[in-house]
Amino acid sequence: MVSEASKGEIRSAADFAGRRIAEGASHSAKGIVTSYLASRAGLPSGSYTPVMAAVDGRREAVTQGLQEGTVDVLTFMEPMTTYMKETGLVSTLYDLATRESTVAEFGAVWPAESLLVTPEFLKDHPDIVQRLVNAMRRTLEYVRSRTPERIAELLSSTYLAGKETADAVQAIAKRWPTLSQGDYTVSPGSAQLVIDAIKSAPFDDTLSGQIRAKVKTVDIDASTLYANAFVEEQSPVAS
């Protein structure tokens, strides 16, 4: 999203140079996506200034930044996206909220929520991996066969702490288009997209950031990063 005050000057990621962007940590998914957009637009690393906002009070901090002109662009997910749009302070610059819009922009689906295991664990414990995959797929199938209202009813009060029921339903409904339906596999293009995006990201000096930064110096075969056999063996769950 781009601030209303800057949207006349920022029409694409090519205009990120010299701007202040609220995106979370540089090694978060939001930070990596932002840097990838900038890289694809031809900007070198460090062209813009990341603006960090702690989770607690993030809405208020980012809103204040927009009002004061200290934030030009922001990259967030739901429900933060809807909240910021409702302030009237931002407009959509890149729509990555659905499978279709993400493929249109990147050429592949971003495999955001996946089961990650080491190659050693996969080899030694295929039965456990299969059970975990079964649980994830059945959960997705269950969620997609219900309504946002029903899912909000089933979620614990702890998860929805501080949220009105209507707000919770709206947030869940906004996530609906991002949930896989029918095809739960990872494509070669999706795996390569993640590699390319991470290689474009500037990482900070934290331990987490430096671990991720190692990928920049390694040639990675995308086909070794995913295994669809566990998904393909699973039968759909009954309603």
Image (spheres, helix red, strand yellow):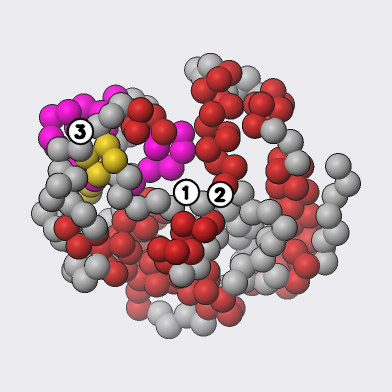
Q: What residue type is labelled 1?
A: Ala
Residue 236 in magenta? Answer: no
Q: Which amino acid does label 3 sit on?
A: Leu
Labels 3 and 1: the sequence-earlier one: 3
| Residue picked out by circle 2 | 178
99 or 57: which is nearer to us?
A: 99
In percent of width and height, residue 82 lies at: 41, 33
Residue drawn where x is 52% and y is 32% of the image: 171
Residue drawn where x is 38% and y is 43% of the image: 76
**Label 1 – label 2 distance at C-alpha:** 6 Å
Magenta-tinted stretch? 58-81
**Label 2 – label 3 distance at C-alpha:** 27 Å
State yes or no: discs 3 and 1 in contact (Cβ < 8 Å): no
| Residue picked out by circle 3 | 66
State yes or no: discs 1 and 2 in contact (Cβ < 8 Å): yes
| Residue picked out by circle 1 | 97
Q: Which amino acid does label 2 sit on?
A: Thr
- Label 3 residue SS: helix
6 or 199: which is nearer to us?
A: 6
